[in-house]
Amino acid sequence: MHRLLQLTLRQAGSYVKDVKASQCVKKSLVQASILAKSYTTDASLQKDRDFKGHDMLAPFTAGWQTTDVNPLVIDKSEGSYVYDTNGKKYLNSLAGLWCTALGGNEPRLVEAATKQLNTLPFYHSFWNRTTKPSLDLATQLLEMFTACKMVKAFFTNSGSEANDTQVKLVWYYNNALGRPNKKKFIARSKSLPALHHKFDLPAPFVLHADCPHYWRFHLPGETEEEFSTRLANNLENLILKEGPETIAAFIAEPVMGGGGVIPPPATYFDKIQAVIKKHDILFIADEVICGFGRLGTMFGCDKYGIKPDLVSLAKALSSAYMPIGAVLVSPEIYDVIHSQSNVLGTFSHGFTYSGHPVACAVALEALKIYKERNIVEQVNKIAPKFQEGVKAFSSSPIIGEIRGTGLILGTEFADNKSPNDPFPPEWGVGAYFGAQCGKHGMLVRVAGDILMMSPPFIITPQEVDQLIDIYGKALKATEERVAELKSQHK
């Protein structure tokens, strides 16, 4: 796809190994733009209407794209599929943006939204006023999350708002305890570096620990457990360097999603938790992608033995039928917030749409469906076919690693199957693969030379077969393209 290739190449600097390679990306933009024309597919050739130069300031989209290229306009959804305005059908292998867990036309969710719209389309949750759906949803979430005890749920409109809320909660908490200097956050490198470009980010209070990607960063002869030990030691050294009295929280996804689908190495979270507990640092579990069954457990915390102080939720919370996110708060945190808000007279944080009754009603119905259909068991039944089917392509000479668990998977393209030999960014290997998937009727996410998939929980064995078949066709075409490019550069 013309637009997909150019976007991927312009972001590739976030994923290549070093600054020199990133500079190479920028120098190759003109060449890449010319090369991209050969990757155009019918997905970028909307026949019914010219949408170029549309009026939206589109998220995660370069300005030239809206001016020069027709967007792919999705018109309707049905189960694991979506259709564009030309009627072309695509297998939605990313579940929208990791989120449409129950597929595209679950009637019970539509009915829940309609019923609530007809009853109470909106009321806020400020000043001890609220709605029954928001109260019921808070109760259900606290009962559902069993990795450790949580006592309160705060509602947002997205996972991003949930994580922004975490920052304010943690600062509020430490201020209440008389620890005004304990304000820094530690995330992991390679989470979402593109988010920082030209936004004066990361903020000074955000630090970065090592990325827990064993294939890419382990030392020769180093086992996964030894790798985890080294990363835990490096984390502790970072904490000691900054001063434990300045570090407020560590935030992590159980499986890194947008950073390339990176499951943790063996014993990683056991060792990381020991370090942060030793230094009185809070653990924030970002379950926005992993939560509600994607990993084959109800939450990622269940799979990896994580005992968080705070949890961020969104995406599958409503199967994305309505925008909603949430923060779960442990009793230790809430007790301090409760006391401090009594002193101040209020807890001054919230959003107009916090606990929106329609979003909460849809989320409640989604949680009911997860329980009634035993969605975790359903994921565990289909996941082996998905994982094994795609990983069967691991021997491809252009694939460095295929990694994943449950219904989330990443493919990283590399020359000589080595993390130290990326393909030249201007070749656009990942973008070419993604364009081939689109050509054959499947939507994927591409970031540099990393491909990501997270299909709906309702995907059938036959649809997994189709996914694997399209993956294979795209891989064969991409192998041929790489061979052609290599022959031209001998």
Image (tube, rainbow, N blue to C red):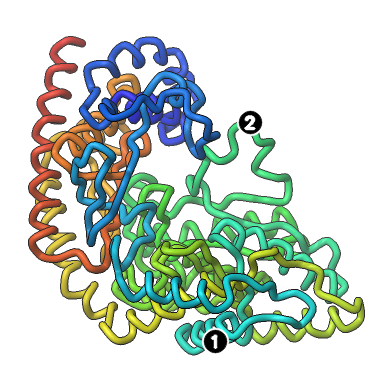
279 relative position to 196: left or right: right
Q: Position of residue 314 (x, y in %)?
A: 49, 65
Assign a secondary structure to mark 2: loop
Which residue is at a point 21% across and 76% down the rendered structure image?
378
Q: Position of residue 323 (x, y in %)?
A: 51, 62
Let me know if residue 338 appears in the view.
Answer: yes
- What amino acid is found at the position of numbered circle 2 in the picture? Lys
Q: From the viewer's side, name the closer residue of 32 and 218.
A: 32
- What amino acid is found at the position of numbered circle 1 in the picture? Asp
In the rendered image, the quadrant that contains the C terminus is: top left
Q: Quadrant of residue 164?
A: bottom right
Q: Position of residue 190 (x, y in %)?
A: 48, 45
- Distance of mark 2 from mark 1, alpha carbons? 41 Å
Assign a secondary structure to mark 1: helix
163 relative position to 253: left or right: right
Whether residue 168 is situated above or below residue 378 in the rendered picture: above
Label 2 vs label 1, nearer the camera: 1
Which residue is at a point 20% across and 41% down the rendered structure image?
87
Which residue is at a point 63% across and 31% down the rendered structure image?
198
125 relative position to 98: left or right: right
In this figure, which residue is indicated by the disc labeled 2?
A: 198
Q: From the viewer's side, name the closer residue of 364 and 370.
A: 364
Whether residue 409 is situated above or below residue 254 in the rendered picture: above
Q: From the viewer's side, name the closer residue of 165 and 422.
A: 165
In this figure, which residue is indicated by the disc labeled 1?
A: 136
Whether residue 4 is situated above or below residue 278 in the rendered picture: above
Which residue is at a point 22% across and 17% down the rendered structure image?
38
Residue farthest to the front, as pictured: 118
Let me know if residue 290 appears in the view.
Answer: no
- Disc tally is 2
> Mark 2 or mark 1, which has the lower sequence index?
1
